[in-house]
Amino acid sequence: MAATGLHQPALERHFPGLEDIHAKVLAGERLSFSDGVRLYRSGLSAVGYLANIVRERLNGSRAYYIRNQHINYTNVCNKHCKFCYFAKNPKEGGPEPYTLSLDEVRAALRRYRDVPITEVHMVGGINPRLPYSYYLDLLRTVQDERPGVHIKAFTAVELVEIARVARKPLVEVLEELKAAGLASVPGGGAEVLSERVHAALHPKKLSGAQWMQVAREVAAAGLPQYATMLYGHIETLEERVDHLVRLRELQDETGHFLAFTPLAFHPEGTYLEHLPPPTGRDDLRNLAVARLMLDNFPHIKSFWIMNTPQISQVSLWYGADDIDGTIHEYEITYAEGEFGNKRQVLTRHQLIRNIVEAGRIPVERDSLYREVAVQEDGRKGLD
Amino acid sequence: MARLATESRQEAGIGDIAAKVYSGERLGWEDGRRLFHHHNLPELAMLADTVRRRFHPEDIVTYVVGRNINYTNVCWVRCKFCAFYRVPGDDEGYVLPQEEILRKVREMVEVGGIEILLQGGLNPRLRIEWYEDLLRAIKHEFGAYGVILHAFSPAEIIYIARISRLSLEDTLLRLKAAGLDSIPGGGAEILTDRVRQQIAPYKDTADAWLDCMRTAHRCGIRTTCTMMYGSVDTWEDRLEHLMRTRDLQDETGGFTAFIPWSFQPEGTELRGERASAFDYLRTVAVSRLILDNIPNIQASWVTQGPKVAQVALEYGVNDFGSTMMEENVVSSAGCSFTMPIAEIERLIRDAGYRPMRRTTQYELLPLGVPAGSPLLSTAKSDLFPSNHVAL
């Protein structure tokens, strides 16, 4: 309670139906599946308030960000997931297919040569024509261009594809990728760990059980990993909570997850275009419930490219302690925002200012959440 | 970094303020100061929601189907926060002809709208007769459709009075007789002369703005009140704005709603950075808490976007404002959110409220158009197809 400096009794009347969860949160007790479902159905402010207690207990007032670069090496993909804009071919209004050559990757890296990034984040579609050597060369190219940078690359689905073209067991492939520079594995592609959603939206991609098996092998290889959840399509609230509980159990087992990021589904341009775009409330609620349920995850990230800089700033009081990066070469989510809100950019200056204004302490982190720089006063941290 | 890890922000609690809010006690300057420095957003939301539910116990969020018409952009006042105006003589200056305005009103009536918001610059060529003619023409043609004229902010009223050599009261009564129903609370900016001197040195003073509203209320014209924060203002300026508004409301009871929105810097003389979503939500919540005598707080989705506007429903907002149909002022300053009615209603429902249309006076309109309107037989319940075109 001291964590929020609040005179508790005065606000207690705001937790009707959540008194027991409030007590569990204060006692640091694990929440159950049914607690999670109730949190999804309770008042947003109360849930945000509870999530903030956990957030401050684990991360104080810090708000992390990273200077990183995203490289999406190909948009060619044979998985045809219904929620993906990339799944459409150009005749259906989808994007032109591309696969970056190593020279193009090199050029993309050189574009930001003068920015002191600490991470390169590399993911792509499943392009069956790419040989094993391409993936190894991608990693080597990044290492060569940006020595010392942390390479976070290849989601679980890509790892399985790489092992397929390598004709080797995943465990061996992971060792070879590590030797070529792979330092951690991004969380994309988990979608929702539900067999129903898997069958309906992404049957050609890994099932939930397969995704979790890859995660175990990633952990065994000594690589840290991140976790995500794609929400706002056809999943039920129960399926969201189940996803969180499964991740929590897996983390109990492996302990290798660094952060969880709920990703809002953006229907524009996909086969699910008839669905409405994500709302600010749902963004905040997913972060808050995740913070409360995932008691063994050190960090909860609000990815501002998906959530907008505005919601990400506010989310620093709804469980999130990280708002991701400052370089936006990110092509997966269809670029135009809903209702005339054109694609947004966020400079480091604005990002720090947003954090400071929200009463948080901006901390530039590396991929492993080690501190690169702290700005007690945002203005001092500006370039 | 051990210090950061163990120590979280030790802010003074607001439990005593919460106790006042629950018991319905009025908050003072010191409470306002502390609230403007309080960072815990969910706490502010819970408190503001208490006041909102006192005014609006039912789970309803309202909006009005209306159109914004900017009849002239000619203005000599040169406010530094404005990217819309053109000085007299500028090639890009315009005054919309009456036929054009009537055409715009008709378009609104055809989609079931009822509120016409008329606002424009201080144009030295327009005297009171021009305004009277316009109001009468609109009422003559569309009065039977229930069209409500929500028109002319205090700066315009004061200027019309001055160039027509009339008292404020006579001006207001003549405009009312010609069909004026309600006055928008625009141009309040920040009601402290310190700020007004810096951002709009040629505009009316805070006292003049308030006095115009006082006079309007006495003439039986109800008004809204806005606050444009985030330019050069400090928390003291914002709080003074809220306190002065509350005082006048105690005196007259004439304000229907309060609408805070943030300065949009692009293309303006002031420039600077756009105030953040955090700042907006906190300012909305503090407004709801301090203004214990104004029934409605409007979201500004035009400046904040649909996501933040929806979240603001947790922070004391009970109204989504007008559907606008066109917006020319903040969109000149780089802000261009537009939203169809169906999306407004979806956001309201998603937040757990029932969307209902209203009049300018906040009377609920379950069917979207006033009883007796010929539109009832043909009214479309869906969107404005033209809503995306305007910008």
Image (tube, coloured by chain):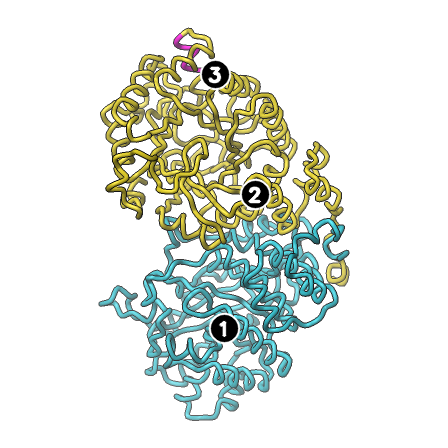
Q: Position of residue A289 (x, y in %)?
A: 58, 64
Q: Quadrant of the C terminus of chain B?
A: top left
Please state which amino acid type lies under the numbered disc 2.
Gly
Q: Nearer the viewer, residue B383 or B209?
A: B383
Reply above or below: A176 against A18: below
Question: Residue B162: within the magenta?
Answer: yes
Residue at label 2? B316
Chain A, chosen colour in render: cyan
Residue A373 visible in the snapshot: no
| Quarter occupied by the N terminus of chain B | bottom right
Disc 2 is attached to a residue of which chain? B
Residue A108 placement (x, y as % from top left): 42, 65
Horizontal arrangement in the rendering, residue A172 relative to residue B282 (left or right): left
Does the image show residue A133?
A: yes
Q: Chain of mark 1?
A: A
The magenta region covers: B158-164
Q: Outermost residue toward the front?
A: B372
Q: Are marks 1 and 3 on the same chain?
A: no
Of badges 2 and 3, the one in the foreground is: 3
Drawn colour of chain B? yellow
Q: Which residue is mark 3?
A: B219
Outermost residue, top side: B165
Say which residue appears at 74% left-offset and 46% top-offset. Answer: B15
Q: CA distance from mark 2 to mark 1?
A: 32 Å
Q: CA distance from mark 2 to mark 3?
A: 30 Å
The residue that disc 1 covers is A239
